Image (spheres, grey):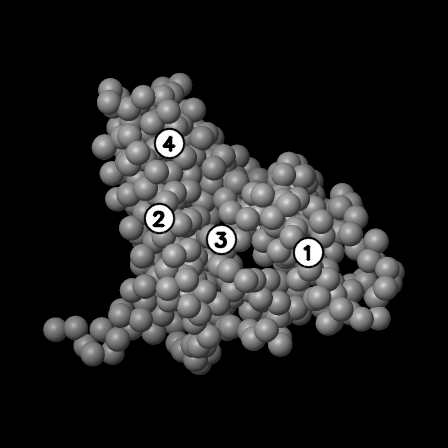
Amino acid sequence: MIPHQDVARLSSALPFWMSLGLIPLVWLGAFLGGWWVLLPILCTWYLFSALDAALGLNLENADLETSEDELVWYKAITSAWVPLQFLSLFGLIAYATRAEHLSGWELFGVFFGVGVMTGTVGINYSHELMHQKNRLERALGDLLLAMVLYSHFRSEHLLVHHRYVGTPRDPVTARYNEGFHRFYPRVLRQSLVSAFRAEKSMLARKGLPWHHLSNPFWKYWGLQTAMLVLAWGLGGGLGLVLFLVQAGVAVWQLELVNYVEHYGLTRKHLGDGKYEHVLPRHSWNAAHKASNWLLINLQRHSDHHYKPDRRFPLLQNYTEAEAPQLPYGYPVMTMAAMMPPLWKRVMNPKVRDWRARYYPEITDWSDYNKARTPMPR
């Protein structure tokens, strides 16, 4: 018989396990073909948007004194996802490349849905895992990123984004009035370069060259190569193409979220290349209940920047008086980001209001608006 305490802990964690429902949806699409391939897309973007509207906001905060032992069912979600995603991704490559009932467009649809799964859930879970002190969890995070060929995200996120968020030195901070379709190619290029520079600089401070074996890029390249070889081995050239399709969709999903999280928000420049400390006001937040279940509280983004290794069930909600709030959850906001005129009509006034509230003394924002290349490190 399961102790009452364990039952209570499991029941409180269960809503966050909803993400596992995407796995049978991608398999169902592959088995049935036709319009069924749209199920993961409809569920992730539209169903959770509808659930947000129906269920409203969650403004409650967990007790920060909660012990690690009490979080076992929450930690199990992110760890269990890794083998499940691996088996689904490569199992689908082996199955779909031999499925005669799937046309070319249906194959594309299936792996577009897989990319929604590996991006919306997989990369998000890797983000949770990479921030933990446990070596096994960090390794699991690396595996998830290798499955979408975006391993450098770990270096960029930990060494660049968290340090330079809200400044021109952070490629991932979307500039005011910068549409997503300009942001996306810029961030793909600059984040890879800035991640490599950051690791190279760390090695240089130890008196080591960039090509030293301790550079994690060797591990990144090795894991990614292994994933590509496995995809080719299971499905040949078509399997490799389908793997690349899901990886591209996953990275696009990640960068859509990155675009939303800090759009137009900048830290005050103090002179001599120095900026104020990161504050709750430098991240957009959303308290929408259902999308926070799907995204394991990623929308409580200000608290994540305050305490990066804080596990997701303990992330705290900030009120509108403390941090800027999005009008809708990430599923709606990322769809809006794909339509720059709509996005700017909704968000630019919010950025201007944010500036007037927190920085009334700044009258010239021109330097803050420039999408400059990150400075050399």
Label 2: how many residues lie within 10 Å, few (<14), some (14-19) or many (20+)? some
Indicate the quadrant containing the N terminus: top left, top right, bottom left or bottom right: bottom left
Dot 2 or dot 3: first in sequence order is: 2
Instruction: Give 298 or 325, whichever is nearer the viewer.
Output: 325
> Which one is earlier in the sequence, the residue at label 1 or at label 3?
3
Picture residue at 29% right of the left edge, 64% below the top: 14
Cβ–Cβ under 8 Å for marks 1 and 3: no
Q: Which residue is mark 3?
A: 332
Provide the secondary structure element on which disc 1 rests.
helix
Residue 306 lies left or right of residue 16; in this view the side is: right
Q: Marks 1/3: CA distance?
A: 17 Å
Cα separation between marks 4 and 1: 34 Å
Label 4 belongs to which residue?
109
Asked whether the residues under the numbered discs 2 and 3 touch, taking CB atoms below 8 Å apart as contact, a structural biologist would say: no
Cα distance between the residues tagged 4 and 3: 21 Å
Q: Would you place residue 293 above or below residue 279 in this image?
A: above
> Quick check: marks 2 and 4 in contact, CB under 8 Å?
no
Q: Amino acid at mark 1?
A: Asn
- Return the disc, 2 or 1, that comes first in the chain's sequence: 2
Query: From mark 2 to mark 1, how far is it between C-alphas?
Result: 29 Å
Q: Amino acid at mark 2?
A: Cys
Residue 208 is situated, as x and y percent measured from the top left of the image, at 69, 44
Comparing 43 with 256, the one in front is 43
Location of mark 1 (residue): 348
Quarter of the image holding residue 79?
bottom left
Residue type for callout 3: Val
Question: Label 2 belongs to which residue?
Answer: 43
How far apart are the two marked residues, 2 and 4, measured between alpha carbons? 14 Å
Question: Which residue reaches farthest left?
Answer: 1
Q: Is residue 308 left or right of residue 205?
A: left
Tell me which numbered mark, 4 or 3, is placed earlier along the sequence.
4
